[in-house]
Amino acid sequence: MTDKKEECGIFGIYGDPEAVQRTYFALHSLQHRGQESAGIASSNGELIHCFTGMGQVSRVFRAGRGVLERLRNPMAIGHVRYSTTGSSNPTNAQPFLSEFSQGQVAIAHNGNLINASLLRDEYEAYGHIFKTSNDTEIIAHLMAKPSHVIKPDPLGHVLNHLQGAYSLVLLFQDRLEAARDPFGIRPLCLGRTEAGCYCVASETCALDAIGAEYIREVEPGEIITIDDSGVSSRYFVKPGTITPGHCIFEHVYFSKQSSIIFGESVHNFRVRSGHQLAKEHPVDADIVIPVPDSGTCAAVGYARESGIPFDMGFVRSHYIGRTFLSPSQEMRDMAVKMKLTVVKDAVKDKRIIVVDDSVVRGTTTKGKINSLREAGAKEIHMRVACPPIKHPCFYGVDFPTCEELLANQLDSLEEIRKFLDVDSIGYISLEGLLSCASLPADHYCTACWSGDYKIPVCKMVNKFSMERHQMQLFDNQEL
């Protein structure tokens, strides 16, 4: 019922004869983080091969094409994308493969660089030519700069030029490197397979998918190198000098329930948020129902704390994507109904508490409330497991502009209640949400609720700021 978009998912593995096949399965497990494009790059120690395409993993690497077989090498990285900078088109699919004086490098990136446009303007002024309109390509240009190549730690030097959120995995011809921004905004973890091969992933669910054990998180400001000698670590910022700014919305919505991120279980966090929500906003009702899937754990917690029975009032279709573009409002409304079907026998003549992870624009939420009314619900009480979203995100979440955010445009909870057509509404408080996390409150980024940005944004950043005429060329080619 939320109108948010996903981000990206990354994975890398070294020293496994089936590295490409394992990367394929890992990307499947990270599909919830991005569904626009997917790609895998692999190396045999001398040459990097890369294949990317539009759509979900199973479509890009569909059986019978022989792509995975041709990519077969002992080291590989992979990426699933939702575009937060640059359009959804084939040129922006990752991993991004480039070549410079030190050889080839493939880069997969989760996050958003808020100074990418400024860096690109600077490099274009010196004659650099860019192939894409996404922010990841600027990293390759920084790496290729002659004065950067000769530094004692070229990659660390390059990362110190970047501002914003980035979890990165880079495949060189003979090694794999992974890095995380100094604030640790996006998650990244290290694992090891039963055969002793090391791997990195956005979430631990990718490790589970290939039977690898979780070792630890990649620390904020850390670079990990995996090669024939094993794993080594170094820092490009001094540890402990920057207070982390983990995106707590990862716990609320993005990450899979089975994952461990920022050192704790996503499932347990969401259940605790449901308990807290019930304490802050109790109401008499007959059943508690979730908006699947990300609202389910919070609904379980709400039901346990309130003592009101939990039930499934919606059935989610897994064959309708999270984003759905249709040419008419009638078709869009039909898509919403197909995506979440009401279980009429569960809700008819009942007083219902509906638990969702968040409300962004509110239009989809309103449609689902209407469906419950049509199914005969007696009362509908909306409970939201995060505070009202009032500010856009510049760190890798494609939240709309302020003008599109429901809580920014309406002045009070009463106005939101009337717009959604519910009998009551309650959002968890920011303090209550932070109390559900195991780390100190100042270790999380809460900008989308509080407007307190961990990294100041000096220039308005938008998804298409580096588009220029590249998309026009792409459109003409498509025609």
Image: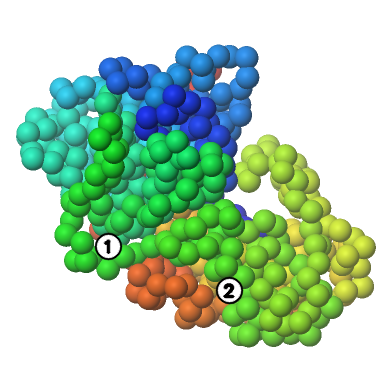
In what element is the residue under mark 2?
Answer: helix
**Image position of 245 with respect to 162: above or below:** below
Residue 25 coordinates in the image, percent (x, y): 55, 34
In what element is the residue under mark 1?
Answer: loop
Q: Name the residue under label 2.
A: 273
At x 57%, y 77%, the residue is 428
Q: Which of 121 and 456 is in front in this view?
A: 456
Q: Which disc number belongs to residue 88?
A: none
Taking the image as shown, residue 196 lies to the left or right of residue 237, namely right
Q: Using the rendered image of the protein, determine whether residue 66 is visible from the camera's viewpoint.
A: yes
Q: Which of marks 2 and 1 is nearer the N terminus?
A: 2
Q: Name the residue under label 1.
A: 456
At x 81%, y 62%, the residue is 313
Q: How crowded is mark 2: few (under 14 residues within 10 Å), some or many (20 or more)?
A: many
At x 72%, y 39%, the residue is 319
Between marks 2 and 1 in the image, the one whose residue lies nearer the viewer = 2
Disc 1 marks which amino acid?
Answer: Pro
Q: Which of 139 and 220 is in front in this view?
A: 220
Which image quarter: residue 297? bottom right
Residue 153 coordinates in the image, percent (x, y): 13, 41
Q: How crowded is mark 1: few (under 14 residues within 10 Å), some or many (20 or more)?
A: few
Taking the image as shown, residue 81 lies to the left or right of residue 378, namely left
Which image quarter: residue 87? top left
Disc 2 marks which amino acid?
Answer: Ser
Which image quarter: residue 307? bottom right
Q: Which of 212 and 268 is in front in this view?
A: 212
